[in-house]
Amino acid sequence: MAISERDIEHIFERLRSGVVPERGLEIFAVGIDKQRTEIHRQLKLAADSEGVFKFLRGGYGCGKTFMSRLAILDAQAQGFATSFVVVSDNDLQFYKFDDVYRKVVQELGTSSCARSALSDIIDRWIARIEDALIAGGANENSDEFDDQVQQRMEEELASLTGGKAPEDMARVLRTIFSLKQKGEIAEASALLSWLSGSENVAASAKKVAGIKGDIGSRDALDYLHGVLEIVKASGYKGLVIVIDEVETVLRMRHDSRGKSLNGIRQICDAADRYKGLLWIFTGTPEFFDTKRGVAGLEPLSERIQFLVSGGFANPRQPQLELKPFDANRLKEVALKLREIYPTANRNRLITKITSEFIEQLVAKVTSGFKGDVGVVPRQFLRQFVNVLDLVANEEDFNPMSAEGFEIKDLNEDEQRINQGHTYFDEDPADVKGYAAIEF
């Protein structure tokens, strides 16, 4: 599988910080084929104009963020716009839909625009409207052409949303187009910020569009519906929204926690009305199974219940289970990373970072967690990349001795390498080279 040098550098730089990379994940994805297949099925449903949701379920270290980041990459590769939102303490309360809307739109991205892609998406939509008008006989050089574009924008938005798009949304979109046509980019950007949910837009900018106030919780999901339809009208198959680390809700106060869980229930109940939108939530078993979490809100618990039969969980049910890492899976990831690590001396990397070393490093990192491999992938990979760096940059660095590992059962060649010798005994005649031989 081909991968660019830029993405390889990105992968290792992120792993050095203990963070999941945002690109190139497929190159070292291991043991998640079934889960990835189910995400692809969900993407197919969304592309076919279904409104769907999925919950990724897994304990600490199971790879929920990795899986959801990979889902974002797969979605963009298939022509979706995406948004990746990480929940942090007191940062996102799901019953405040204006908070949800603002986070989603601010993190809006596409394959060509990684973040804050709303402006680009709107420009693409308007360009398609202009092309359609011209194809229908309109004169793009006439004084009336911009008015025709604005009128068609309003008509399309109303048609696509079934007339449910807020009036202020239509006003702001028309004004953004008008301001850009006049070259008043700063003013247009202010209104784009307002449309993205910002509460810090000057009253003077709002006045230009004939609007007051900010996007409120009551109307926020209608605005999201409008954004979704514009995304599709601009040429994308749909929209994928990831809400990562939703178990953070468990740390809220009882009243806020209950209302946030009910907000998630409302999103799930309304999902089928948002054609082409896939919601993906990630959470720990504690979030789903305790009374403090989903199990404490019966309507939500019933909607997304997790069933296991004979030790098997159907991947097509609302909760998609991610299995913990085991030693073999972690070793396989390490070998894939060793394979793509950028170095001028690959032979040194392979001979010093052996399969045996990787196995012992897994055991060492997990020793502080009573041998539980499932909770240490992030820590292990961070330490493993550090070893890769040292081997690549320090000729005399021996990872086995540095980590305090005892070297066992070496064959003759491995013993020579470990002692710093070559594969063969040197012969003084080798210095002179070979004499010419005639046949």
Image (cartoon, rainbow, N blue to C red):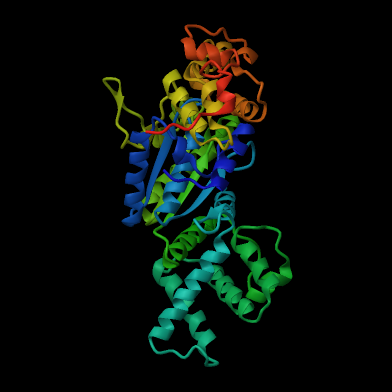
Can the viewer see residue 58 in this picture? yes
Q: Is residue 103 above or below residue 30?
A: below
Q: Is residue 144 above or below residue 24?
A: below
- Residue 312 location (% of width, % of height): 29, 24
**In the rendering, at what x and y percent does residue 399 appear?**
61, 18
Q: Quadrant of the N terminus?
A: top left
Residue 234, relative to residue 94: is it above or below? below
How far across and how far down the image is residue 208, in percent?
A: 67, 76
Quarter occupied by residue 196: bottom right
Q: Is residue 169 above or below residue 20?
A: below
**Horizontally, is 134 left or right of 112 in the view?**
left
Give 408 or 151, whichever is nearer the viewer.
408
Dividing the image into 4 quarters, which one contains the C terminus? top left
The number of discs equals 0
- In the rendered structure, the answer to whether residue 233 lies left or right of residue 20 reads left
At 53% from the left and 85% from the top, the residue drawn is 147
State the image coordinates of residue 294 (x, y, percent, origin top left): 46, 31
Instruction: Pick out the residue farthest to the left.
Output: 310
Q: Residue at x 58, y 76 (%)?
A: 177
| Residue 266 seen anywhere in this rendered image of the structure | no
Residue lying at 50% horizontally and 20% vertically, measured from the top left: 354
